[in-house]
Amino acid sequence: MKKTLSTLLLSFALLPCFAQSASQILNQVAAKLQNTGVKASFEATTFKGLNPNGTVLGTIQVEGNKFKIQSNSMTTWFNGTTQWTMMSGSDEVNVSTPTEAEIQKMNPTAFINLYRDNCNYYMESDTYDGKMCRKITVVPKARASFQRLVVLVDANGNLMNVRLKDAKGNWMRFRISQLQTGVKLSKSTFEFSKKDYPKVAVIDLR
């Protein structure tokens, strides 16, 4: 729903330090995620309609468009082009080239590639985990790979929560905690190393 001027003014009165546009705030969050190494813990939940359809807990390391995700079910490396996925307890790692939509569902910071073009933005004050925050909703003006994106950002411009409604109408929620920025990460962080897993078979699916 499009916010009226009075609603926006009320939001800014409640949160005086938030007197920025939604796009400016998202740009600041994106800069933090793209320009420095990032580490965080996350809880990712998929939904079928309104009902939770599965939850994954894990940690993520990100630098630009590269990431490594370790969860209770798998480890995924992505160097910006190639992805390696190894299920927990498996003796195989699958190599693939993921689509943009697949990356969005795995990486909670991938929203930075969604909001920039041909979208409407709506911002309001909200509360998350007992803290005041900015709730930014992004809706594409034309058909896209997603229907809606909802981002919660704290007063320091740190990412707290991301909800993504995909093109099929299913939601995915990422809860972010223990966020660290400015972390130095090596190139090898984002690539599967055969030396570290000498007994694991590499299955190339490209």
Image (cartoon, rainbow, N blue to C red):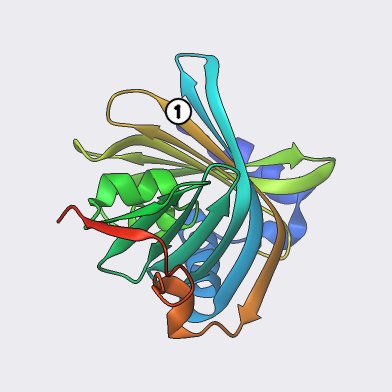
Q: Residue at x 32, y 58 (%)?
A: 201
**Where's residue 143, x and y in %?**
19, 35
Nearest the eye: 11 or 130: 130
Quadrant position of residue 66: bottom left
Residue sitting at the far left: 206
Q: Circle 1 sits in a helix, a strand or a loop, which is it?
A: strand
Placement of 120 over or under 197, stated as above or below? above
- On screen, residue 27 versus residue 41, left or right, reads left
Placement of 53 over or under 39, stated as above or below? above
Nearest the eye: 106 or 94: 94
For disc 1, the neighbor class at 10 Å (few under 14, some 14 to 19, many from 20) is: many
Nearest the eye: 174 or 199: 199
**Where's residue 147, x and y in %?**
33, 32
Report whether residue 160 is seen. no
**Where's residue 62, x and y in %?**
50, 68
Amino acid at dot 1: Trp
Nearest the eye: 199 or 202: 199
The quarter of the rendered structure image containing the C terminus is bottom left
Residue sitting at the far right: 130
Report whether residue 167 is seen. yes
**Where's residue 93, x and y in %?**
35, 55
- Which residue is tagged 1? 171
Quadrant position of residue 135: top right
- On screen, residue 95 versus residue 184, left or right, reads left
Q: Residue at x 75, y 57 (%)?
A: 16
Placement of 8 over or under 154, stated as above or below? above
